[in-house]
Amino acid sequence: MSILADYHLHTDHSGDSTAAMEAQILAGIDRGLSYMCFTDHYDPEFPYDNVPDVAPGTFELNYTPYRDEYLRMKEKYEGRIHLRFGVELGLQSDLYRDHASYVNSHPEFDFIIGSNHLCGGTDPYYPSFLKERTEEEALCLYFEETLENLRAFSDIDSCGHLDYVARYLPHRDLFYTYIGYADRIDPILKLIIERGISLEVNTAPLMKGMQYFNPLPDILARYLEMGGELITVGSDAHVPEKVAGCFEETALILRSLGFKYYAVYENRKPRMLPL
Ligand SMILES: [Zn+2]
Ligand SMILES: [Zn+2]
């Protein structure tokens, strides 16, 4: 396997996962990973009122037990796999002060993914989202809000699942193309390049049977063309079966696009590994 680092992983410290951290680690060792970075959810002020089947607090990471278990596991698995400590921060542009204080008060994180889980104030995961929008409107709104979020707060290491909303469209990624949304996507790519942020390649859609990972290969090709080189790769696994999911296939696509390296982070500093 040529991608040896899974930099987007959840455990039961996220309210939407029941996977024990140790079970995730054993799956990673079994798949031949050298690096695993846990990135449990911290989504401040998630609009629980709009998604009634999600219990309030589901995405609010309880830092201390998460950190304690990580340190125990890191010691236990020393010499077998390199473990790293991260978070998936749910961005909302008007919460930039909260994001800054969270990041500044937790310098122990090796890696911070900044993700947009909302579109028009709700999570597109929930079916009510598309009742009042076309696919095109949903994509436009999602990219606009992602840009607003990153303009407001960019102290992150990787931009998570850039076209996340496509996972939940009726036609998923069958018809949507980079070129149809270039005027909205290019400013996002430009901003992350200028600020030295990685673009995440999130393989979860491949595991769900979609054609591509997030974001579309054409978006990654455009990123490279604009001078973007930093990428991280993550399975977004909430269960052990999905750790490092579709990494072989992803490596082939990334190499065919012209990528030669992917990044691993420690103490929030990137280091490139060959692809
Ligand atoms: Zn996410
Ligand atoms: Zn995630």
Image: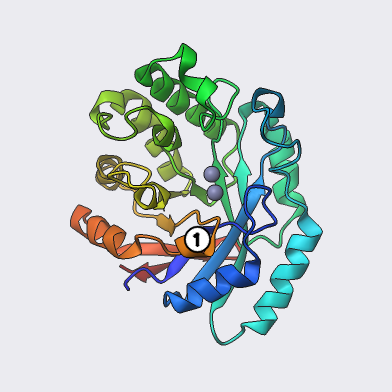
Query: Would you place residue 95 above or below residue 40 in this image?
Result: above
- Residue lying furthest front: 53
User: Residue 270, how many percent across, how many down?
Assistant: 49, 63
* Amino acid residing under circle 1: Tyr
Q: Quadrant of the N terminus?
A: bottom left
Looking at the rendering, which quadrant does residue 31 occupy? bottom left
Residue 83 in view: yes
Image position of 212 (left or right of 258): right
Q: Quadrant of the C terminus?
A: bottom left
Q: Residue visible at 28% across and 29% down?
A: 176
Q: How busy is the neighbourhood of tag 1: few (under 14 within 10 Å), some, or many (20 plus)?
A: many
Q: Which residue is mark 1?
A: 7
User: Residue 255, how many percent across, how many down?
Assistant: 23, 60
Q: Residue visible at 59% across and 61% down?
A: 38
Query: Would you place residue 268 above or below residue 61 in this image?
Result: below
Foreground residue among 53 and 76: 53
Query: Would you place residue 88 above or below residue 139 in this image?
Result: below
- Residue lying furthest top: 132
User: Residue 103, how many percent across, how many down?
Assistant: 70, 49
- Residue lying furthest left: 256
Q: Secondary structure at mark 1?
A: strand
Q: Residue visible at 71% across and 59% down?
A: 107
Looking at the rendering, which quadrant does residue 154 occupy? top right
User: Residue 153, how many percent across, how many down?
Assistant: 60, 36
Foreground residue among 225 and 246: 246
Image position of 89 (left or right of 225): right
